[in-house]
Amino acid sequence: MSKNPIYLDCHATTPMDKRVLQEMLPYFTEHFGNPSSITHAYGWEAEAAVKTARNTIADAIHCNQSEIIFTSGATEANNLAIKGVAEAYFSKGQHIITVQTEHRAVLDPCKYLETLGFQVTFLPVQKDGLIDLAQLEKAIRPDTILVSVMAANNEIGVIQPLAAIGEICRQHKVLFHTDAAQAIGKIPLDVENMKIDLMSLTGHKVYGPKGIGALYLRRRNPRVQIAAQIVGGGQERGIRSGTLYTPQIVGFAKAVALGLAEMESETKRQLQLRELLWQNLNQLEGIHLNGHPKQRLPGNLNVSVEGVDGTALLLSLQQVCAISAGSACSSSSIAPSHVLTALGHGEKLAYASLRFGIGRFNTKAEIEQVSQEILTSIKSLRKFQA
Ligand SMILES: *Cc1c(COP(=O)(O)O)cnc(C)c1O
């Protein structure tokens, strides 16, 4: 039996923290009640747990608990935010601004809205992956209803200047949505300081369970209108129907709380590991860092390697480590990643790109081992291909 490869794909998903699982377990069995059952103790117990979890998540992003709408994850939250705002503000305008490097869960709802007659501006990014604020401001029109810019990129880890974007949107009275799936529990998020009106969150990128997330929806200054996309029992103030998934909600909140409590020490630790990995790999000729060198998630490293076939490289590393080429969601396709393409890379460089997502459970020994194996692999592939 071969050993499991070292997991370095934390932008695709993270292992669940055992402390999160412990918190969730009683809500599958003993406390199984429906939080909407108001006539008995089973319901009250579940309702209380959901309330506590909602408060924890609200505190983490500095909003009121009534502004948190639980969803099945960030994909659903993005769909609810973008389609929900489009539908609610249809008579005000039909123009939306987003960015070429967004996750598919933002790009695809926008493209869907285009088929309904909405106009969408897909802003380019600069070479470092950051948007140009002047370009954003110039793109705002009288009929613009929404700007959607992600907090942290899932491929190159680049962190967009949220507070500056929020300021521009507020000045022009345009709603600001951010997909913070990669950011929650990793970098500080404050919807007041950053003037964010809608924010998508998910549990499974922050050592919590899959299948749970939330949309933050501002209720004052301004009060955001939204059209429900899933209707039924009227849960979550009618904005998102469906029986609340208590264990997942409890786990999501615990994961967010742990992320916050350990953010400072983890950031420092992951930065050290990331720098170590980059220093090791950078010994090679023809290796390039993708994305801004500093303004990025501490655990993210994304590199392009010249003179090797990306697929061959990943194949040769399969037993060693679990990493991905570009985005996991599209890694089965052979097209170069839309994010690296937006950075202005030619197809060749984009092909031989590696995305590392270092996480809470990775160690220095793992990083050293992976570095050496990658160096060996690249050198032998280059020799073979030359
Ligand atoms: C993972 C991810 C999503 C999708 O989140 P799910 O909870 O899996 O639906 C959306 N946006 C970004 C930036 C992500 O990294």
Image (cartoon, rainbow, N blue to C red):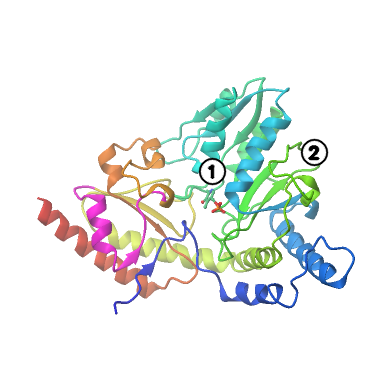
The tag earlier along the polypeptide, 2 or 1, is: 1
Q: On residue 221, which mark appears? A: 2
Looking at the image, the residue that sits furthest to the top is: 142
Q: Which residue is drawn at 73% across and 31% down?
A: 88
Q: Which residue is drawn at 81% across and 60% down?
A: 36
The span picked out in magenta is: 306-327
Q: Does the residue labelled 1 lie within 8 Å of ligand 1?
A: yes
**23 or 308: nearer the eye?**
23
Q: Do the residues labelled 2 and 1 touch (CB within 8 Å)?
A: no
Residue 223, magenta (yes or no): no
Q: Nearer the viewer, residue 269 or 41?
A: 41
Q: Where is residue 54 in the image (x, y as percent from the top left)?
A: 75, 60
Quarter of the picture holding the N terminus = bottom left
Quarter of the image holding residue 372?
Answer: bottom left
Residue 118 appears in the rendering = yes
In the displayed structure image, the side of residue 187 where residue 243 appears, left or right: right
Which residue matches tag 1? Answer: 105
Residue 137 lies, in percent from the top left, at 59, 27
Give residue 204's position: percent from left, percent from top.
56, 61
Q: Residues within 10 Å of mark 2 (few under 14, many from 20)?
A: few
